[in-house]
Amino acid sequence: MTGISFDPFHSVFKYNQWVGNMSAFYALLFTVAFSIMVLGLLYKIIQYSLVPAPLKIPVTPAPLTKSGVVFRLLKEAVLFAALFRSNKWTWLFGWMFHMSLFIVLANHLRFFIKDVPLTLVLLQNVGEYAAFTMFIGLAGLLVRRLYVARVKYISAPSDYLWLVLLMFIGFTGIVMRFILHTDIIAVKEFSLGLLSFNWQALPLDFPLMVHLLLVAILMILLPFSKLLHIPGLFFAPTRNQVDNPREKRHIASWAADMDSEKNKMQP
Ligand code: HEM
C-alpha cells in the first residue's frame, strides 16, 4: 500500500534549516546593504565637498552672515521653504511624506536600541499615524507625476521607482502593524544581533521578508540615485553661500593657487 509518509522529526529539522538559511541570507544582505549605503554616502559627501564653487551665486534675498546661512539651510531642510514658495501642492505632499518618514524611522530606532528611552516610547503613538501620512504623501507625489503633463514629460522611470518602492515599504509596514502582526521581539533580537555581528533568527513572515528586502534594495541604491539630495541640499552653492561679494572677494582655492603662482613669477 502506498501512502504519504510523514516524518515529524525530519520536517522540523528541515524547517529549522530553512529558517537558519533565510535568516543568514537577510543578515548578510543587511550588513552588505548598510555598508554600501554608509560608504557610498561618505564617498559622495567627500566628492561634493571637493567640487569647486568658483562663482558667488546665492539665490537672493540671501543671508549676509554665516549664522544666517545655517538658518536658511535649516529652513530648507525642515520646512522646505523654497518648495513652499514654488508650488503648494507639491510642498504639501512632499513635506507630509518627508516628515512622516522621519517619524517612522525614529520609531524604528526601538529595534536597534536595547533600552528604549521614554521619548521614543511616547513617539510610538504618533508613529502609527505617520505610516498613513507617509503613504498619502507618496501617493500624492505619484499622482502628480502621472497626471501633471509638464512633470510627467520630465519624469524618468527611476522617479516612479522610488515612489513605488517607498509605498510598498510603507504598505508592508502598515500590514504588519495593523493586520498580520509579526514577532517584534524576535525582530529586535535580529536587529541587535546585526549590530553585534551575532546573527539571530528572523521571523519569516511574508510581509516582513518583503519589507526588509525592499529596505535593503533602497539602501543599496541610495548612494547612486536622486536620493542623494539628502546630503546634496547642504552643498548647493545657491543656498549655502553668504551674500557678501562686495565685503569679501570670493575666490575658489584653485584660482587662489593660480594667483599666487602668477605673483611669484612677476619680477
Ligand atoms: C527605509 C526604511 C524603512 C521604512 C520607510 C519603514 C516603514 C515602515 C512603516 C511605515 C511601518 C508601519 C508603522 C510603524 O510601525 O512604524 C513599518 C513597520 C515595521 N517595520 Fe519598517 N521601515 C523601514 C525599515 C525597517 C527595518 C530596517 C526594519 C527591521 C528592523 C523594519 C521592521 C519593521 C517592523 C517589524 C514593523 C512592524 C512594527 C509593529 O508591528 O509594531 N523596518 N515600517
Image (cartoon, rainbow, N blue to C red):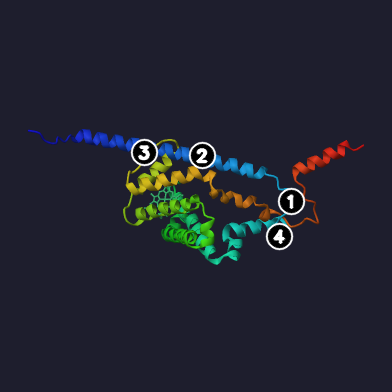
Q: Nearer the viewer, mark 4 or mark 1?
A: 1
* Secondary element at tag 1: loop
What separation in Å lies between label 1 and label 2 (alpha carbons)?
33 Å
Tell me residue 99's x, y (percent). 51, 58
Q: Residue at x 59, y 57 (%)?
A: 77
- For label 2, the SS is helix
Task: Give the residue type at disc 2.
Answer: Ile
Residue designated by label 1: 55
What label does residue 36 carry, if any? 2
Q: Compute the Cα span from label 4 to label 3.
A: 52 Å
**Relative vertical location of residue 61 with respect to residue 181 in this rendering, above or below:** below
Q: Is residue 41 found left or right of 210 in the rendered image?
A: right
Q: Nearer the viewer, mark 1 or mark 2?
A: 1
Residue sitting nearer the eye, 170 or 178? 170
Indicate the amino acid at tag 3. Answer: Ser
Q: Is mark 4 within 8 Å of ligand 1?
A: no
| Whether residue 8 is situated above or below residue 246 in the rendered picture | above
Q: x and y percent of residue 169 in the render?
A: 41, 51
Q: Residues within 10 Å of mark 4 (few under 14, many from 20)?
A: many
Residue at which label 4 appears: 63
Whether residue 142 is visible, yes or no, is yes
Ranked by sequence position, the earlier of labels 4 and 1 is: 1
C-alpha span from label 2 to label 4: 36 Å
* Residue marked by disc 3: 23
- Disc 2 to disc 3, C-alpha distance: 20 Å
Mark before the other along the chain sequence, 1 or 2: 2
Disc with the residue nearer the chain's start (2 vs 4): 2
The foreground one among 201 and 132 is 132
Q: Are marks 1 and 3 in contact (CB under 8 Å)?
A: no
Q: Quadrant of the N terminus?
A: top left
Q: Earlier in the sequence, mark 4 or mark 3?
A: 3
Q: Is residue 117 visible?
A: no
